[in-house]
Amino acid sequence: MATTQFARVISLGRKPSTLTRASTRWAAFGLFVALIALAVVACGTANAANPTVGPQVAAAASASAPAAAPTSGLPATSPSPSPTAPPAALEMATPGADPTALIGWLFTPIFQGLFLLLAVLYALTGNIVVAIVLMTVLIRLVTIRLSARQIMSQKRMQILAPELRELTKELNRRYKGDRVTIQKATQEFYKERGVSPTAGCLPSLLQMGLLFPMYWVIRDGLTNWNPSAMLRVFGVDLVPAIQCPNPAHIVDGVVDKALPCINTVVLGINVGQPQVLFNLPLVVFTLGVSALAVAAGLLQFLQSRMLMPPAAENDPTASTQRTMMVIFPFFSILYGGFLPAGLFVYWITTSVFSIVQQFLIVGWGSVFPLFGWHPGFAQRHVPKFQVTLPETVNTGKSLAATRHKPEERWASAASTVRPNAHKRPSRRGRRR
């Protein structure tokens, strides 16, 4: 979503050239590659993606990830230890000369806060899936005003799109080549109409920023045999109902460190590990297909299609946005082979919450027509909180306010043509 906002902002005030459109597509592709690279580096557990490794060994490998940095509450980027090595307990991060330790220390409060919230909900419900769903709903309720502002901003930009296209044509005609003046006039137009083109970026970045701490919470917190350090604040145990190490995993005084303290298995699904149905060999790599990843991709596609800008002729920006909003949701299917199932539970809950919120604000949006099907209930539906444009702010005689409508432009052009008052006879056919 943030990428589509970026694609809209870079083309303000001018018609994007072919080079600009190509640069936008490559920037979006580069962002996607960067997200994959960051997820793979943060993962650091290649054994979890190996389908031949048994569940006990895979759990031990995931739990042993912090062993490479015993003073860090976040995963290290060093190579993963051997699956047979005993996993280390989850400890608080401390600042040091190592940049990884410093980053871990800075992000420890976020990691610990999310893990404490998840642990409290798990202690109350006794089901880790229900705890993840409740935590996701609580986070979305806290940020509901920001997300509503994002949805309204995107809808208002779509309403203003036809008028903005006409303004852009007029400004390009009057100030051809003067990008500074065109940009200034476009910004004044947004100010007059009370709309900010970047209002929807912050919620998108915030949602993306919470995705990585949630990954670490599920991978390192839920799969660790002793995360008790993360359950204490200033030496006070905030969740006494959870005893780590788990007494059920202690046999003859020996702790089974291959088993996590928190029960992560629900209905036969281990939310702390990737859940791959089958492997699909492709040309470059093998794709691990996960049912949760497919469900997350379909829900994100529905969420994106509701806010998809309408198709417009000779508008490459809208065409680029529509293409990205169709393709990007299905990238999550590629993550199903190595991301834990609990993260997809968080992803699915977030998408369902967003779909319900968008339905109340924009209705069905651009979901229909779907394969030529446009049902009557979608055409007659009126959103409960319908988006309207704010009142126009009178900022004076701005450049955007002096734009001419097509009929006014023709009248202005006709008034500048001087009539032929002399009525000189034509030279054609005159005798010499």
Image (cartoon, rainbow, N blue to C red):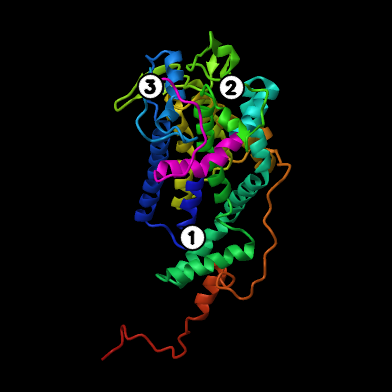
The Cα–Cα distance between marks 1 and 3, rounded to whole angstroms, is 47 Å
Task: Determine which residue is flagged by label 3.
Answer: 47
Label located before the other in sequence (2 or 1): 1
**Which amino acid type is shown beneath numbered disc 2?**
Cys
| Residue 12 numbered tag | 1
The Cα–Cα distance between marks 2 and 3, rounded to whole angstroms, is 25 Å
Residue 241: quadrant of the picture: top right
Question: What is the secondary structure assignment of the residue under circle 2?
Answer: loop
Q: Is residue 339 visible?
A: yes
46 to the left or right of 368: left
Label located before the other in sequence (2 or 3): 3
Task: Determine which residue is flagged by label 2.
Answer: 244
Q: Which span of residues is magenta-colored?
A: 85-114
Q: Is residue 185 part of the magenta span, yes or no?
A: no
Residue lying farthest top? Answer: 252
Q: Residues within 10 Å of mark 3 (few under 14, many from 20)?
A: many
Measured from the top left, where is residue 370 in percent x and y?
55, 33
Question: What is the secondary structure assignment of the residue under circle 1?
Answer: loop
Residue lying farthest left? Answer: 432
96 to the left or right of 403: left
